[in-house]
Amino acid sequence: MADSRSELTVLLWRGAQEGRYETYKVPSCENQTVLDIVTFVQRHLDPTLSYRFACRVGMCGSCAMTVNGRPRWTCRTHVAAVAKGGRLKIGPLANLPVIKDLATDLRPFFDKWQEAKGAFVPSQTRNDDIARVRPDSAARIAADAAIECINCAICYAACDTVRWNSDYLGPAALNRAWTLLNDERDAGNAERLRAVAASGGCHACHSHQSCQELCPQLLNPTASIAALKRRTMWAYLRGEL
Amino acid sequence: MTALAHRQSVLWIAALVHRLSGLALAIFLPFHFLTLGLAIEGEASLEKFLRWSDQPLVKLAESGLIFLLMVHMLGGMRVFLIENLAWHDRQKELAAVAAAVAALVAFILLARIL
Amino acid sequence: MNVGLYVWQRLTAALMVPLVLLHVVVIFYATRKGLTAADILARTRGSLAWASFYGAFVVAVAVHAAIGVRNVLAEWSPLKSRDAGILAGAFSVLLFLLGGRAVVAVVLP
């Protein structure tokens, strides 16, 4: 793509919860990712810039930031695809406390993961035989469809219900709870169902589907949450909750 | 630091319309009940109100209310489908169609009563 | 919003779909020739059918609207969840009372 602009105007969030966007000029190259931009600023323009990354190849989810209003993996976002008129606005992920500049505190995200009982509860010990789980069972297919979450928090940052309702456990935590509900080895499902049926659980979701729209792993938390709603509703009507 | 970009999607707007129409209907309802309750005072009271409501502006408002009711119900059906069928294809088109149907019903009523 | 509130909101919504459709049809029919109070009341007074129809409608909407309002208050206003619930409960009572009065007003012979 012919690009007559030799440099980009990049606004980066500096500060913590309070702060402001500062402007930097970054040379424009072909095949640049947003992570390249941020890295350039930190290395050549302002070493005090704080940001997070790890794998740089779209596997770990650490580099998630808000780019021109949308939460994205910066290592997998090409500048050419998002920079309008040679401008980029990059901020930390929304809905999370800002530690510094572009790095956020993910503890609330993981705390809610625990609250949703998103951790596997074993039903056997190392002395038992390995569980035989059929990959083509309905439950395993349902779990597999939602299992590839790498906790990047993009869905959490995108979700308006998370923003409006501080009790809401969020799409990722609930999505994980759904995969575990479908795990025949798991022994904690009674408590898990209660956790997702409580205030702030799956019923708080309004099916806006921003999570599904923006998940880089192409997961559909809205569908998982919808399944949780059905499961909890029937349990409630049967008096099990 | 608000993220507004993905709030231009048809589905997000559909959810917002659903919420706002619900709010508007909730606010309208007590007045609707009070109006009908005029019949307690006798036929004449209710008749007086009905004649007052013959004005074009009021009829426009009434047709607007029908629109809100239809769009809220159709929006609710949309949510019901998402939650019980977890379908994805063509949701955007169907959301737009639902809004169009609501508008059509309201318009037909307006044409009749104006 | 928890599972209990969710179930009640969805149930009342499902109940109201046929009620709303019939209500809109009634409005279309009633506005055929210009509506007078006499026309309305002639049909509704002493009618068990209309009493049941609109009575059910009032109960359902009192529950449904209140839960919806509770959610909006809890999410969009500074109110805490508990206070939103209390306000919504009061709104539910208001709708139930005013709605019940309206049904009585048009149905009592």
Image (cartoon, rainbow, N blue to C red):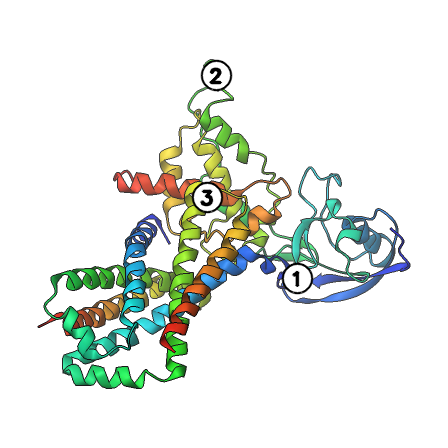
Mark positioned earlier in the residue sequence (2 or 3): 2
**Distance between the alpha carbons at the discs numbered 2 and 3:** 27 Å
Horizontal and vertical percent for residue A60? 67, 39
Q: Name the disc covering residue A225, or none.
A: 3
Picture quadrant where residue C91 is located: bottom left
Looking at the picture, tell me which residue is in the foreground, A192 or B55: B55
Q: Name the disc covering residue A16, or none.
A: 1
Which residue is labeled 2 in the image?
A: A132
Q: Which SS class for mark 1?
A: loop
Mark positioned earlier in the residue sequence (1 or 3): 1
Horizontal and vertical percent for residue A184? 43, 25
Picture quadrant where residue C47 is located: bottom left
Tag in front: 1 or 3: 3
The amino acid at mark 3 is Ile
Q: In this view, does C86 lie to the left or right of B87?
A: left
Picture quadrant where residue C66 is located: bottom left
Whether A225 is drawn above or below A20: the answer is above
Looking at the picture, tell me which residue is in the foreground, B76 or C68: B76
| Residue depicted at x 65% and y 55% | A70
Q: Indicate the quadrant containing the C terminus of chain C: top left, top right, bottom left or bottom right.
A: bottom left
| Residue depicted at x 20% and y 80% | B38
Res A206 seen here: yes
Res A165 seen here: no
Q: Is residue C100 left or right of residue B51?
A: left
Horizontal and vertical percent for residue A36? 81, 49
